[in-house]
Image (cartoon, rainbow, N blue to C red):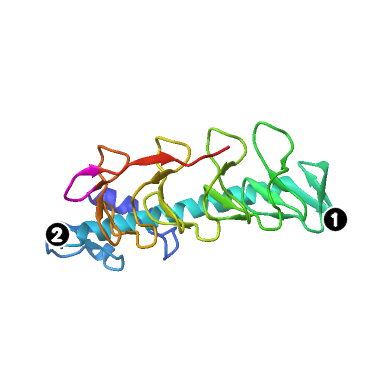
Amino acid sequence: MQKELKDAMNIFEEKLLSDIFIIPLRLEDCQIPLELLEIQYVNIYENNGWEKLIHAIELGIEQQNEEHVLFEENSLKSDYEIVENIVLYKGSITDIDGSTFQIIDSIFSKDNKYVYCQTNAYVVPLRLLNVEADSFRKINDQYYSDSKHIYIMTQSYIVPMILHDIDVRTFKILDRGYHVDKNNVYKLTNSYIVPMILHDVDAKTFKVVNHRTCIDAQNSYIDTDQYIIPFRSGSKELIKWTLVKWE
């Protein structure tokens, strides 16, 4: 155990103070090793111990994802050059407007007229003709929007998919794959490439409470490992659902 702790601490010394790399767990009330005194630990035996641990792990994953995205963005920027307002992509001249060109993330860029999508399938970025460049923005690593539509990027398609009938102005990402707008509650799972609409759930009052439970003004809902959708607490009735329309 001493060797493993020493190896972990050697790596930890290379991290930033804000990085979540080691999470000491106390299974019972005991003395903490001197090497770990300055690191935030979790008392797993307390009532909220598991929730604190899960929260710390989720924060650590978010940090790693942000570092990965930053690395990809830097890699993407190295593919572009702007010389006297002429945009070069991997050394080749493009018709992108250099005076308004901006990189959004590792996939998308835009100028004042068009949004461009970089893929490994083509040697040049794809021009997306039906996307509004002025209002196009990134919501998170999967979702994007313009003033009319929500878009989702999946591994199955090289361009973003348009999700219909979602209210752009009120669309909000919650925890654990849940989303809401003013009309519906949605859930994105690994089983489908687009979100599911959860019927008869109150979108205005819907909240994610913890890693298993959600609530609205009328009901509580429980997530299990057995089903991809939650069931209503008490009745154990699975929520009815349909897939969001997409193209």
Which quadrant holds residue 116?
top right
Q: Is residue 233 visible?
A: yes
As drawn, 156 above or below 2: above
* Magenta highlight range: 232-237
Residue 1, numbered circle: none
Task: Say whether disc 1 or disc 2 marks the residue closer to the N-terminus.
Answer: 2
Q: Is residue 22 visible?
A: no
Indicate the amino acid at tag 2: Tyr
Residue 234 location (% of width, % of height):
16, 50
Q: What residue do we see at 15% from left, 56% from top?
A: 27
Indicate the amino acid at tag 1: Asn
Mark 1 neighbour class, 10 Å CA radius: few under 14, some 14 to 19, many 20 or more: few
Q: Is residue 233 magenta?
A: yes
Q: What residue do we see at 51% from left, 53% from top?
A: 67
Q: Residue furthest bottom?
A: 38
Mark 2 neighbour class, 10 Å CA radius: few under 14, some 14 to 19, many 20 or more: few
Magenta residues, dominant SS class: loop
Q: Secondary structure at mark 2?
A: loop
Asked whether, in this view, residue 123 is left or right of residue 247, the answer is right
Asked whether, in this view, residue 137 is left or right of residue 229, the answer is right
**Number of numbered tags placed on the structure image:** 2
Residue 45, numbered circle: 2
Asked whether, in this view, residue 232 is left or right of residue 16, the answer is left
Q: What residue do we see at 39% from left, 62% from top?
A: 204
Residue 206 location (% of width, % of height):
35, 59
Q: Residue furthest left?
A: 29
According to the image, label 1 marks what residue? Answer: 85
Q: What residue do we see at 48% from left, 42% from top?
A: 244
Residue 228 location (% of width, % of height):
32, 39
